Amino acid sequence: MSLRTASRRVVKISKEGGLHSLPGQPVPGCFGYPLSIFFIIINEFCERFSYYGMRAVLVLYFKYFLQWDDNLSTAIYHTFVALCYLTPILGALIADSWLGKFKTIVSLSIVYTIGQAIMSVSSINDLTDQNRDGSPDNIPVHIALSMIGLILIALGTGGIKPCVSAFGGDQFEEDQDKQRSRFFSIFYLSINAGSLLSTIITPILRAQECGIHSKQRCYPLAFGVPAALMAISLVVFIVGSRMYKKVKPQGNIMVQVSKCIGFAIKNRFRHRSKEFPKREHWLDWASEKYDKRLIAQTKMVLKVLFLYIPLPMFWALFDQQGSRWTLQATTMDGNFVGYFLFFFLYVHLQQTVNPILIIIMVPVVDAVIYPLIKKCKINFTPLRKITVGMFLASLAFVAAALVQVQIDKTLPVFPAAGQSQIKIVNLGTDNVAINFPPPLQQVNVKPKGWVSNKTWRITSTCNVSYSEDISPNTVHMAWQIPQYFILTCAEVVFSVTGLEFSYSQAPSNMKAVLQAGWLLTVAVGNIIVLIVAGASKLSEQWAEYVLFAALLLAVCIIFAVMAYFYTYVDPNEVEAQLDEEEKKQAKKDMDMYEKQAEADSQM
C-alpha cells in the first residue's frame, strides 16, 4: 500500500500530539484519505463488535439467566437502548465545551470497558451458587451487577457516539467533500462488519458450557469477549493519537445557544405590540445581546433539529429487531439443514441477517444504485433518501405481520396466568374416557387421536404418567429474510444519509451536538416502543406490527412535507460570509476611529 498526501495543507505536531496548521510537510495520507481515519475506523469496528456482541445475547440473558418474562425482557432491553442514545447529548457537551472529542472518547471508553467487564462478572453462575445445584441462589445480586454494568455501558457507548463520527469528519479538509462522504459510508460499513462478526460469534460463545461447580450456558464468555474487544478499541484509538487533527473545544456552546434562544423568546414577548416592526426571523430578536454569528449558527441547528422531530418513529420500528423480531424467531423453525449451507443456525443468530445484508447493500447502493439514479436525472436529495427509508421500514413491518399471522396458525394455545394446560393423546386402539374431579368435565379421546389443548384452572396436584413435547413450529426462519432485507434497504438510505446530513448542515463548532441530536432520535424511538406497546393492549402480535407500520407511514408523509420546504445550507459559506462582514465592520470601525482621532487632533 503506497502512501501519498491527502491534501496540500501543511501541519505541525504539537506537544499534545495533534496536527495544527504550519508551513512544512503535507498531511500523511493513503489513497487520498488522511491516514488517521484508518485508526478511527478500526476503533469503531472493535467498539461496535463489543456493543452489538453484548446486545445480541442480552434479551436471552434476561429471559433465561435472570428468569424474566418476555414483556419485562423487552421493556428493559428498550430502556437500555434508549439510555444508550440519550447519553450522546452529555458526550457532545463534554466534547464541544470541555475536553474536546479526542479526550472525551478516551475517557468514556475507559468507563465503557469497565461496564462490559462488570456485565461479564454478573453472568458468572457460580458467583452465588452456594449449594452448587447449577442455579444462582441470589438473583438480586446478579440483577444489581447487570444494571450497574448496563448503566456504565450506556454512558460509555452513548458518550462517544457523537464524537467518533464527527472526529472522523474533522480529519478532512474543506475541499475533500467527496472523500468525507465516502468516509461516512466506510464508517457505517465498519459498524456493520463489527456487528456481523459479533452477532455470529457471541451467540456461539454463549452456547458453550462453562462453570466451576456446574456446566451452564457460558454468558461470562459471551460478555467477556466484547469487553476484551472494547479494550482493544481503546488501545488502537490511542495508538493513532499523534496523527489526528484535533479541533480544540470552543466553549460551552450549548449554554450559549440556550441563552440566545431564551433571550430571543423573552425579547419577542416584550415587543409583541404592533408598534414594533417585525423581524425576518424570531431569533433576530436576540441581536440586541448576541452577535450575528451565534444567531446564524443557532438558526442552522434549529432548522435541522426541527426536521428530526418525526424521525424517532423509524427507530421505534428498527430497534425491534433485537426484541420482538428475536422473540418471533424463537417460535420458528431454525433448522437450515437441507436449505442452504447444511448447518444448524441457532435461533438467536437471526440477528446476523441485518449486518450481512448491510455489508452487501452499502457498497451496492453507494456504487451502483445512487449513480444510476443520478444518470436518470433524478435529484435524490438526502431528505428524499430519508423519506424512502421510512417508507421501506413501514413495509418491513407489514412483512413481519404477515409472517406472524402464519406463525399464529401453528402455535398452541397457551394458558393464562393461574391456569395449567393438559393435552391428552390416545395411542391405543380403543376409545378412552378421562374422568377428572369435579368441576372438571369428562374428556373422550378417539383411538390414535388427541384432544386439543384444554385449559383449566388447576387447584389440586395431578400425577402425570405420560407426557409428550409439542411438535416444533413448521414456519421456517427463512421467512424472516424478506422483512430483514426490506429493513436493511431502509437502514442504508436512512441512517447513512442521516449521519452525513447531520455533519454537512452543522456549524463548525456544533457538529458533535447535532450528531447527538440525531442519535437522540434513536432514544426517543425506543421510548415510543415502550409507550405504544404498553398503551395499545393488543393481544395479537401481528396487530402490533401493523400498528407500528401504520404509525410510521403517517409520520413518513408528514416528514415528506417538511422536507419539501427545507432549504439546504452550506455552513462553511455562511461562516465565510460572516467572516467577510466582520472584517468589513472592523475596517469600518477602524476608519471611523482614525477620523475621530484626526478630528480630535485638529481641535
Image (tube, grey):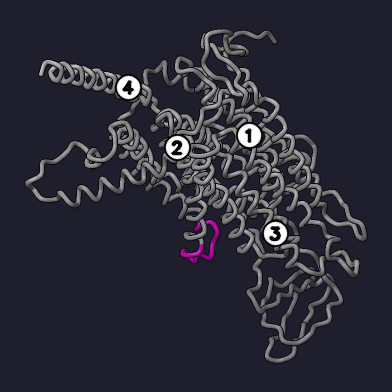
Which residue is tagged 4?
579
* Among the two numbered marks 3 and 1 on one chain, the one whose residue lies closer to the N terminus: 3
Image quarter where the N terminus lies is top right
Three-letter residue code for mark 4: Asp
Q: CA distance from mark 2 to mark 3?
A: 42 Å
Residue 5 vs residue 471, the one in the foreground? 5
Q: Magenta: predominant secondary structure element?
A: helix
* Among the two numbered marks 3 and 4 on one chain, the one whose residue lies closer to the N terminus: 3
Instruction: Give the magenta-colored segment's residue range.
Output: 534-544
Which residue is tagged 2?
251
Rendering coords of residue 47 (x, y %): 67, 37
Q: CA distance from mark 1 to mark 2?
A: 34 Å
Residue 399 in view of the camera: no
* Among the two numbered marks 2 and 4 on one chain, the one whose residue lies closer to the N terminus: 2
Q: CA distance from mark 4 to mark 1?
A: 40 Å
Determine the residue located farthest toward the bottom in the rendered image: 438
